[in-house]
Amino acid sequence: MCVAGALALLVYALTTASPYGLRVLTVAGVYALATFGFQIVFGLGGALSLAQGAFFGLGAYVTGILGSRYGLGFEATFPLSLLVPVVVAAPVGLAVLRLESHYFALATLGIAQVLHLLAVNVPELTGGANGLAGVPGVVLFGWAVPRGLPMAALVWGLVALGGLAGWRLTRGRLGRSLTTLRDDPLAAATLGLDVGRLRLTAFAVSALFAGAAGALAVHTQRVVSPEVLEFPVMVSILTIAVVGGRGRMAGAVLGAVLLLHLPEWFRFLERGYLVVYGAALLLTVVLAPDGLTGLLDRAAVRLFGPRPRRLPDPREPPRPPTPAEGLTVAGLEKSFGGVRAVDGVSLALRPGGITGLIGPNGSGKTTVINLLSGLEQPDSGRVRLGGRDVTGAPADRLARAGLARSFQAAALPGGTSVLEAVAAARLALDPDAATAEAHALWALERLGVGELAGRSCDGLPAALRRRVELARSLVRRPAVLLLDEPAAGLTDGEKAELATLLRALAREGMAILLVEHDMGFLLPLAGRVVCLDRGRTLYDGPPDGVRRDPAVAAAYLGTVPPAERPA
Amino acid sequence: MRRALSLLIGLLAGVPIAARADTLSFPVLVPLTGFLSLEGTSQRNGAVLALKQTPAGITVASEVVDTGTSPEAAVTALERAAGSGTVGAVAASMLGTQMLAMLPLAQELKLPLVTVSGTASITEQGNPWVFRFFPGDAVTKSAHARYVVEELGKRRPAVIYQTTAYGQSGKTHLDAAFKALGVTPVFEEGVDPAAKDLLPVLTKALAAGPDVLVLHLHSGPTALLLRQAASSGVTLPIVAGSAMHQPSTAALLEPSELKGVCAETAASPVSGGSAEMQAFTDSYRAAFGKEPDAFALGQYDGMTMVLEAVKAGARSPDAIRKALSAEAFQGLAMTYKSDGKGNMAHSAVIVCYDGTSRVPKLAKRYDDPTLAAQ
Amino acid sequence: MAALQLLVNGVALGAAYALVALGFVLVLNATAAVNFAQGDLVMAGGLLGVAAAPLIPLPGIVLLPVVLALMAALGLLLAVVAYLPLRNRPPVSVFISTIAVGIILQNGAAILFGPEPRAAPPLFGDDTLRLGGLALPEQSLAIIAVAALLIGAQQWVFGRTQLGRRLRATAQDPEMARACGVPVTAMILVTFAIGAACAGAAGLLLANRYFVTPTAGGDLILKAYIAVTVGGWGSVPGAVVGALLIALFEVGVSSVLSYPVALGALYATLLAILVLRPQGLFGEAVRRRG
């Protein structure tokens, strides 16, 4: 499909296109390049950066100022046009990356507006609103690239290069990590992914692409003026990404070629062409939910049938050396708005031991797991993992230190295959995506669901979802495993299988914490049981004692008024 | 697959523009959308009106293409126009940035650009293909400053300009013109065209103790500032930039709010003055249902001069360029003659409103004010 | 005295911005989608006022209900073409579809009305009341009054009426609201209608004092976006405060510093607010939906 499209463009450029057609094509290439970067930060990373247009403009101004004022050649200006946006993006990113969704969008928009204000109001440097004229064309080692076919070839050569690099990024660890992050930032952190660093990387990479595109834009129009920093450029890039297909490099190319040609087709309408353009845009968004590439994919599936996915050979992931200590917690406390959710809980999860955590609804079990896995920070108390103090460490650091957890509602990403979802859990550990997939298949097979690998996570029955979720934890070979109600909704047979598996894992040296309601499942399995009520430890001892404990019975049955409960 | 391929290619190529070889085409590439659409539409109408009144024996084709506000769109439009038939000359955008972007390409394509852009630098590029049928900022701002200093006798002007290409270029030349007259403005500040309330800048300007307000703003902001000045009871004389003379600016205000306001411009077609000017205004109204302004008239004069050259035998862009750079032409607004750099217009006028009508009266005419000022 | 005069002007401008932001935040609350056509709806409202003025030679206050009704209809149309087909898609789809509608509105207006700036009739009169040395244009007072009235009415509808409770329920959790028997689609349509009507009122009010051109919307949507985010995504009082803050910078700060510097200071303040208070000034009212 991609090859056919590329071929069509090539044939068109070489045979049919007029100088005008080539220019439109060149500009489309420029926008495709800028959109590649946007696909990474927004399409994959899910961060609506409204600074992509600003980085485009920044690259444009670097080339414009250096080219027209100082007469520097392409060899010097082009790398600098790539570099300067990245250098600006890094500190800006550090400041605003922790902002969520719309606040991030507005912050990046604010940065774009400040750059635009500077461009207009510092005429000594930028030429002010008039901009700078006389930017030279591309001169490559003494050869001035003429406009028309050579310039189009240069731009599209860079588009091909950038597209390939972007495509490899998409397929590789960074791209996978970003999609994991986009779909569920919390889950991503518990899989060991450093959310801040990933976003910053994506932001910087997007600035790099935008800078390259800006430089080429200035070389084609030979003038740099504040229009390159204005909001319409940003809107075009966003539109190209969404119309082409979010997160896809082919989508960027398809979107750019279409959106840059669309107004040209309706030029004969003089003033009305933009009305038609708007209507066509609206229609495309409504009719192609996953963008044009999504539409083409579906057409291809209908024509040729689904493309079978080649599975990797399963490979057992290496087991990190088991630490002598598991996870120990002392005096854990956490309040939410004056309510003590966890009040002085102490636990010790030893390697090879299975600990059950029980208690009525709202007793603080899930909060304990959240505290242990770093999703919440404790108010006081100490946490040690593998012999080191990790109190207050963020989720991704804990995960990388050997902790894994599952969620009550299995949080599998939509639209991805089971194999990819499980491989996502290895992204922070493995050198590349292929290795991660091989390891993922091993985990799926160990859980007896290897045949699910190629299926989509959407529409998976609940029991299988739990199995896949468990595979995501298992595949990381954690030292400590926290499971939040893994048996809920399973049949008796499935529960028995799960119990066998957990015993085997414990035998391998894993420390396991099980939050469960099902006593019939938990008590035979656990070597130790802790019962919580209103955030306090009510019982801590062997499983057979728990049924006989009057306080536990009271808490579950609610017969004793809270005031008379033993502390 | 092959059919899909050819379909794709055909789509990309778009609809080919049919053009006969024996007609000359005069594409009109002006901003019809975006913040300069008001001026761009005047330009379009002026050019279209001139092309409608083609002298007998000549067939012309013309296409109007919107250039928006980006240099990129202007360059693309020029390349498109060049590919459709034999182009005689191009009516080109009055947006300075777009002109600067089109100039190198026009030189490569050998196409004369006929514009009414006031941006000084477009005729300073050493490019023989540009012809400006509107006095450049150097001319209009000299007239502007001289009227303030010499006629009104004011020596403490407060200058308020727009932070756009139009405003910044005008401000630079106002500074130079005032300096030549030995006057230093007591206040100078740029305003964004999106600024809604202009009272802050007005308050600051008044605080500087000026004896005259000198404006160089676009149409809407000019009207806004005049209205806020009127409602604040400002009695200082106000001399505005060329946007004031546009009938659409005056239409936003009550005649009483305009009392004592003057403006610099190349011409004021609605003020009449000659039978030919009256005829132009009438046919403009009939064709477009609007009042013409100096931009329309300048573009009209420019395209008329081009057509005169064609009538006189110029059948190629190069022949038209030669005619434009060598001949003098008696247009409706003034006599046009190139100074060797493509500046065709060397006169500016000051018009003033008397407070009873929205049609200004000619107050002072400056022929080549830059020469006199120095 | 000059400071007081600037305050009056600033509040009038802020009130008009608040109406723009209000329409934006209502739709946001009901659908979790950004209506990027809001600025162009304001422009459309202004031009509708301009177009209707010669047909109804009465003061603007009579024109206002006409504009409100027509704009509400336009809001319904917007919802039907640009929101309903995309309601189960990621919010960014609506972002793009409303951008498309904005392009259509802006260029359609340019074709119908031409590029000239226009002035809508004043609500009551064009006179300026003099109070000591203070010039109070009637229109400024009218803007403040109408904005306060509309915002108040909206608070009342949302706080005290059955319709309001249903609208709020829809905004908070459409699935739950549907389960409770609230006609969610109808509620969303009503919200779009109210949002567009707000835009129409803002357009009519702004177009008298500050004129209107077909390209006026682009700047207004940025202002609305800033106001809503600074105030706290989805918070109505936050949006009003955000709008007043923007006006304060445009009118207040720019009376001390130059306009471009004031604009720069606005963005610097904005970034500072975001970094120091990442949930906006008033906290978030809309939780992100998946």
Image (cartoon, coloured by chain):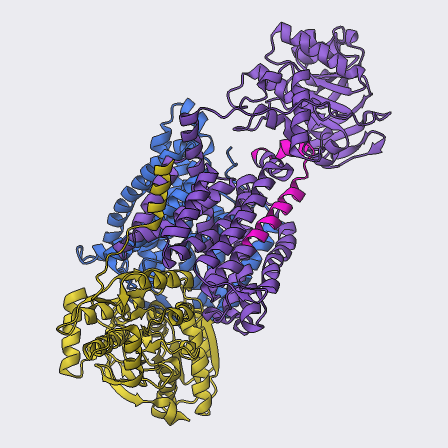
Residue C175 locus on image (x, y percent): 44, 26
Chain coloured yellow in this rendering: B
Q: How far across and down, in percent of the image, does residue B24 sit?
A: 23, 68
Please identify the quadrant where the C terminus of chain B is shown: bottom left
Q: Where is residue A40 in the image (x, y as percent from the top left)?
A: 56, 43
Q: In which quarter of the image is residue C185?
A: top left
Chain with colour purple in the figure: A
Front one among A33 and B347? A33
Q: In which quadrant of the rendered view does residue B247 lie?
A: bottom left
Query: Would you say residue A191 sits in the magenta stretch?
Result: yes
Write down the quadrant of residue A172 in the picture: top right
Does residue B235 appear in this view?
no
Q: Is residue B22 left or right of residue C271?
A: left
Tell me the quadrant of the picture where the N terminus of chain B can be found. Answer: top left
Q: Is residue A437 visible?
A: yes
Q: Which residue is drawn at 52% across and 50% down?
A: A159
Seen from the viewer's position, the closer of residues B61 and C263 is B61
Q: Which chain is blue?
A: C
On screen, B188 above or below C227? below
Instruction: Please state the extent of the stretch shown in magenta in the rendering.
Output: A183-211
Compared with residue A190, is residue B248 higher up or lower down, i.e. above or below?
below
- Identify the residue at image location x=32%, y=64%: B82
- Relative to A105, say whether B372 is above or below: below
**A121 and A130: which one is in front?**
A130
Question: Main SS type for the magenta part?
Answer: helix
Going by the image, does A290 lie left or right of A499?
left
Residue C127, relative to residue B278: is it above or below?
Answer: above
Nearer to the camera, B198 or A76: A76
Magenta stretch containing residue C115, yes or no? Answer: no
Count of numbered marks: 0
Q: At which x and y percent is residue C213? A: 32, 60
